[in-house]
Image: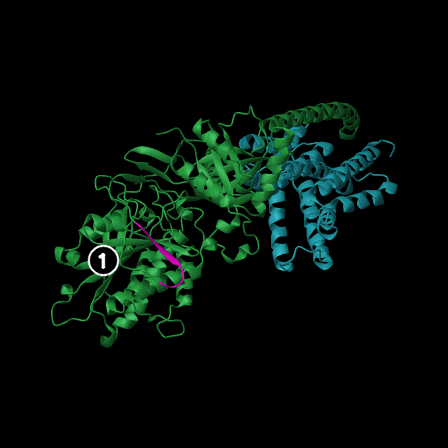
Amino acid sequence: MAPRKSPRERQMLVLDSVIALVFVLVACVELCDGATVVDVYRLIQYDISGAPFGSRLAGLNHHATSLHFSPHADLSRTVLLIPLREFNISFVKEYIAESKPLGGLLFLLPQIFNFENNGEVGSNHLDGTNELLILAELEQILIHTNLPYPVYFAFEDDNINAVLADIKKSDITGQPATATTGGYKFVVSAPEPKSVVSPSITNIQGWLAGLKGGDDAHQLPTIAIVASYDTFGAAPALSVGTDSNGSGVVALLEVARLFSLLYSNPKTRGQYNLLFGLTSGGPYNYNGTRKWLRSFDQRLRESIDYAICIDSIGSWENELWIHDFSSVAEELGFNVNLKHKKINISNPRVAWEHEQFSRLRVTAATLSELSAARELLEKTGGLIDSRHFVDEKAIIRSVKLVAESLARHIYGHQGKNIQIFADNSNLAVNPYYIRAWLDVLSQTPRVAPFFSKDDPFVMALKKELEDHTDEVYVQREALDGMFTFYDSTRAKLNIYQVASVTFDLLLLLVLGSYLIVLFSFLVITTQDDVFMKSSLEEPVIC
Amino acid sequence: MTVFHFFNCAILTFGPHAVYYSATPLSEYDTLGTSIKAAVVYLATALVKLICLATFLKVSESDSFDPYQELLKALIGFIDVAGLYFALAQLTHRNISQNHKFQAVGLGWAFADSVLHRLAPLWVGARGLEFTWDYILQGLEANANLVLSISLAALGSLMWLRKNKPKTLIPIIYLCAGIVATMPSITSYLRRGLGWHFPKVVGFELFTSLVMAFISWQLFSACQRPSM
């Protein structure tokens, strides 16, 4: 038998366990009471054939400094806070080129790039294209560099501007951070970024069958209209790509709508099949287009008369470019320039979507506002591609151009000056439809590897195409293995005002001396007291 | 360094109680039991007060100062005095001299108050990364509260336990006890009625507590004089 414990001992045991339980419970209380919580968007992290690019870390727990830091400071445990307004590209270039150690980088972008509060920017428009150019350059630098620290983007607001002003003030005076001079700690508690398992791309196709001349519909020639809908940018959660290639998607949907009106009536149904394709994987050498084309059967592929790819048509003034195409020309009051580019089959780089068609010997062209071919991962709907820089009128004109020239080709009106889609007719281009879809696209980040299966946006595109065309078919393919992407694209940044260690030490010192003084004071005063009391009280007790 | 800050604030909040116990003859006479009993009485009183507050007080949406409600609150605050009376006069303490008894009761009272009102906010708040002066000020407030509790206990022991006190001092004793007992209402008025900030309120509390302690001390010594 175990030795019996006295009741008192048992009581103590129970009390101890209760106290321990209470402490465990209290310790579990989650602490999250930062002065300011800011939405931040991480720089993309990806590998090309194993070579690392982008920001390699997500977790952040460092003090913040501004660009006014002292030149000899060690920044390896410091977050550098850089507003785009006072941004110095050469400084960042130098910093990145020399791969100096940094605790982290936080870029503050003007609200104009924030797609989440579209209407509120008001008169705060950028006064020049200077900042746009700088941001575009910065984006390219960041995308193509391996940065061994976390890099985040945030939008300026009152809170963070106040923090920035405080940090600047203490940086200029050169004082270390204390409780009174405003040291700030930036904390992002994010898990280690994990690679996205088997990223996939989704192509959507719709079909408008032409008028059968007794034979099978597939015997009719087919015209393909194609637009790539996904994007790639420095911050995947901000890559909405309004111009590249949201504008192309909008144009394609509107063309599909117009021709579905024409094709719904047997009298106006043309002798061509129309094939609409919304392809994914655009930034990655049009990988999705390639897979889509390979999936066609031989008869369909041979029946394609030609293919029009629509790419970035949202912000042109009076010049469009048709890349390697020779049959559509227009007289709608602006120039359409032809540009031929030799395609080198052995080069893996595919600059234009139509090149994927050309490689399969299908006549194809890309309609674009861009005059020169873009480099890999350039102008693919990154940070600067905001709704504010896209002109709906340009899209409307492009839609007119494409629809009109298609109609003339289909109905054989070439050379005649007949406007089928004239304004104010019931076949006019609908600006509300275009604006609605453009708004949706400019608020949806569309980096393909981060799309979940059955993503609502892809489903919405499919549904829209189903409304206008028949035989809508969704094709899911794996993205070819060259790219690896990592998750945690957005996070919450907690900003804490913190006291320095020196302050805490000093406080401890002050408190210690206070208690010692109190102790001595009490001992001295009560000693007399006791002396007095004991002498006093004895006669009372006796 | 946040645990460090928590540690600092905890020292400031609870240190003086420990120092008071160990520096004064309380520790020599082993009056811990009395203090614990007083703390238990405090807990019971707090519970009764809570029930009364919940029963009689309306929940005000705004943070404004409502005189009627505050008066009611002050009245309910006098339950504290009743609790203190119970702790001082009704609880049987084994052989403990009167002037140790009120110190022990006041100490236990103040310590229970600090634990009940300040430990949880301190644990949750001071460990966070964000720095504020609030917890240091709260610690100072705990010190003022300790002094006030002991003063009130001293005055209470004069009122209820000492029979042979000078007649002229009796009104003064009652007046002082009244002032000390209404201190929570006074600070509440300063904070919400006059809109004082926390540092100013704490400064006021520290100042008044020292003044009241000095007055109580003088009264106590006056009553001690064998001149009666």
Answer whether residue A337 is magenta in the image.
yes
Q: Is residue A98 above or below residue A278?
A: above
Query: Residue A260: in sight, yes or no?
Result: yes
Q: Which chain is green?
A: A
Q: How many marks do you count on the picture?
A: 1
Whole-percent x, y for residue A510 in the image:
67, 26
Nearest the eye: A38 or B175: A38
Q: Is residue A235 above or below residue A102?
A: below
Query: Residue A16: in sight, yes or no?
Result: no
Colour of chain B in the rendered structure image? cyan
Whole-percent x, y for residue A96 in the image:
45, 30
Q: Is residue B135 above or below residue A513?
A: below
Quadrant in which the N terminus of chain A appears: top left
Whole-percent x, y for residue B123 in the image:
55, 38
Magenta stretch bounds: A331-339
Residue kind at label 1, given as amino acid type: Tyr
Q: Is residue B37 above or below residue A465?
A: above
Indicate the secondary structure of the residue bearing disc 1. Answer: strand
Answer whether residue A426 is magenta in the image.
no
Q: Residues within 10 Å of mark 1 (few under 14, many from 20)?
A: many
Specify the farthest residue to the front. A415
- Which residue corresponds to mark 1? A306
Nearest the eye: A154 or A19: A154
The image quadrant that residue B183 belongs to is top right
Whole-percent x, y for residue A515 in the image:
67, 26
Nearest the eye: A98 or A79: A98
The image quadrant that residue A309 belongs to is bottom left
The image quadrant that residue A523 belongs to is top right
Image position of A40 (left or right of B77): left
